[in-house]
Image (cartoon, grey):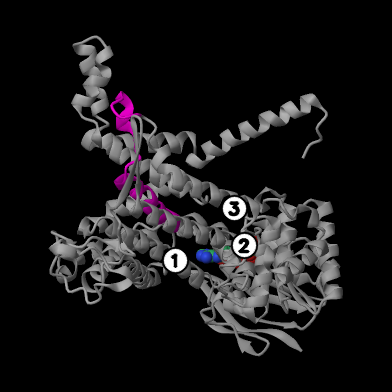
Amino acid sequence: MFGLNGKDTLLLVAVALLVAFAPILMNPFPQGSALEIFNGGYPALMQRFVIFGIFAVGFNILFGLTGYLSFGHAAFLGAGSYAAMWMMKLLTINVIPALIFSVIIAGIISLAIGYVSLRRSGIYFSILTLAFAQMAFQLAQSVLQPITGGETGLQTNLNDPRILPQFLGGGSNVDGNIPKPSLFGLEMSSTYDLVMGPWTFVFNWGYYISGLMLLIALYISIRIFRSPFGMMLRSIKSNQQRLNYTGLNSRPYMLTAFVISGMYAGLAGGLLVAMDPQVGTERMQWTASGEVVLMTILGGVGTLIGPILGASVIKYIEDIFSKFNDTVLNIWFDFLPDGIVQDGFVWAISLFTGKQWHLASGVIFMLVIIFLPGGLVSLTKSIGDRVRRKPARDANDASTTPAE
Amino acid sequence: MSILEVKGVNKRFGGLQALGDVNLSVQEKTVHAIIGPNGAGKSTLLNCLVGKLIPDTGSVMFDGQSVLGRTPFEINQMGISRVFQTPEIFGDLTVMENMMIPCFAKRDGSFEMNAWGSVGSQKDIVEHAEEVLEDMNMADKRNMMASSMSRGDKRRLEIGMCLAQEPRLLLLDEPTAGMARADTNNTIDLLKEIKDTRDITIAIIEHDMHVVFSLAERITVLAQGTPLVEDVPDNIKGNPKVREAYLGEAQV
Ligand SMILES: Nc1ncnc2c1ncn2[C@@H]1O[C@H](COP(=O)(O)OP(=O)(O)OP(=O)(O)O)[C@@H](O)[C@H]1O
Ligand SMILES: [Mg+2]
């Protein structure tokens, strides 16, 4: 289907189903239960699952296939956000021109940065990308303040020009409110609440738009992985010298991969603004570049769905663990004897939660690197193997059904 | 007619004169061996031919065109393929994928954006790669990861990858080094077959005299970066200067 082989089609369909039903799957705990805090099925978080999934899927096209580790992709994420913001300020609140523009701008900037950075390989390439991204960050804070809004950042305003207010259904700028990003007149923030007993499932328009983008992004990524171009990128990772002595110029291959991954980052940046119309320079900071590296490695470098998994896990930890506070923890560990034991537990856990959620993600990252060097995907794979092997053995025992 | 003309090539590494005034002329459609003791500058000379090193002085002409100042992939696209002293293959790719890459380079040139269709849908490339694998007797290994093969098979694959490009000049740097006798004999047979069935010129560096005398039509002896003699194999065998070069090494 769609020019994909059976296995890849299955993967894409599986991801599509997960995206479609995530609002239900991510909300397993009924309201009012002790575990409700672990529910991740609210729009703000699910949007970030898929948006950072797009970011990581694109990053993986560069890092996973070619092995070139960029530490500067936050620059493209930020550029995408600013580009989308300006489209929504100047042209229309409809998100389509905003997203297209964010991809184009990120593509142009990644072309420039990639062109220079790819003169070096290995650690020098990484350092160059980091240096460029830090320059972009500094520029955004200083010289480019008229475009970026400096430290305060940008948001949509009532008095933005918006020369095409009615474009493609326009937006919801009725009765003097700040218009909210929308598509075909439907706001990104519009939701439908499905109440089923103690459960409330929230279906959000913006999430499904982003989810659709993720599926398109993944589809393109699969095609690249299976194409001759993808094979060339893998051969660069394997032995760049051999490639050059085989008459192939690795530079344009690398640059194309770099720009594609930059455009993915731009799309992710644009979507972030479309979901929540504000952007500040921190989106371009080096920590954001590091985060996408972690996501990709955590999920599984060079695999198709690993990056999406990694992005979801990190965003989940960031949101959920930062919600924990001493009050919540004390309720949890109430069953423990009061006094030093309970306090000790609460204290120990609180080290990894609240503002210190980074510690929790650090520990998980460490465990994965040590025990699952292939990333979280290798976990799902070994479980899958175990599940598959078992019925096979049963079939052998029966010794009537021939092997497939 | 000579296909490769090396004139007055010098190359220094700091204080070391790796190549000193090298002149070499390789005739079209012959097998030309370059021999010499360790450190004589044989690999350095090859590096100067494929764009890995740039000589300090001198000229290197391939088929009437200078190769100097060109990048390795450009020189390869001119028609020079090289097998390295230690096999250089794509270890993380399958044997079949290894073979397809030079087929793409042959068909599409140095860069072609081919990011939408699957690799398998490139029927002519698949066919071409299969054909060369058959020629190399490696078809049964097509789905193996290249890094998991024996050294002899890796070398065979690398030679096959070079042949897939149908180069006019094939450069071999000690193709049988570290091989068992049987593998060496297989390689000799393979190279003989290549030489007999294709319009190809081969320049081979080799320590194994059995290989050299089985294949070479002309031999250049290199010692301390300078060609000592160049002649047909029979005259090289008894040449006292050659013995001296090798014996001199033995005494060190
Ligand atoms: N890149 C380099 N930098 C410095 N010295 C080098 C370099 N490459 C080769 N040399 C030196 O140049 C000399 C010639 O080396 P080369 O590898 O060409 O010898 P060779 O004839 O191929 O020997 P072998 O039979 O051992 O492969 C050696 O002394 C070597 O140490
Ligand atoms: Mg050598």
- Sequence-first disc among 1 and 2: 2
Above or below B174: residue A195:
above
Q: Label 2 neighbourhood size at 10 Å, few (<14), some (14-19), many (20+)?
A: few
**Residue stretch in magenta:** A30-59
Mark 1 and mark 3, same subunit?
yes
Q: Chain of mark 3?
A: A
Between residue B234 and residue B100, name the one nearer to us: B100
Q: Decide: marks 1, 2 in contact (CB < 8 A)?
A: no
Q: Residue at x 52, y 51 (%)?
A: A304
Pointer 1 residue? A260
Between residue A349 and residue A63, name the one nearer to us: A349
The location of residue A156, given as percent across then percent down, is: 18, 63
Q: Image quadrant for the N terminus of chain B? A: bottom right
Quarter of image, res A183 = bottom left
Give me the C-alpha separation between circle 1 and circle 3. 21 Å
Q: Amino acid at mark 2?
A: Gly
Q: Image quadrant for the C terminus of chain B? A: bottom right
Pointer 3 residue? A8
Q: Amino acid at mark 1?
A: Ile
Between residue A298 and residue A166, name the one nearer to us: A166
The location of residue B52, given as percent across then percent down, is: 55, 71
Q: Chain of mark 2?
A: A
Say which mark, if any, is on residue A3.
Answer: 2
Q: Amino acid at mark 3?
A: Asp
In this rendering, position of residue B244 left or right of residue B198: left
Q: Is residue A32 magenta?
A: yes
Quadrant field for ligand 1? bottom right
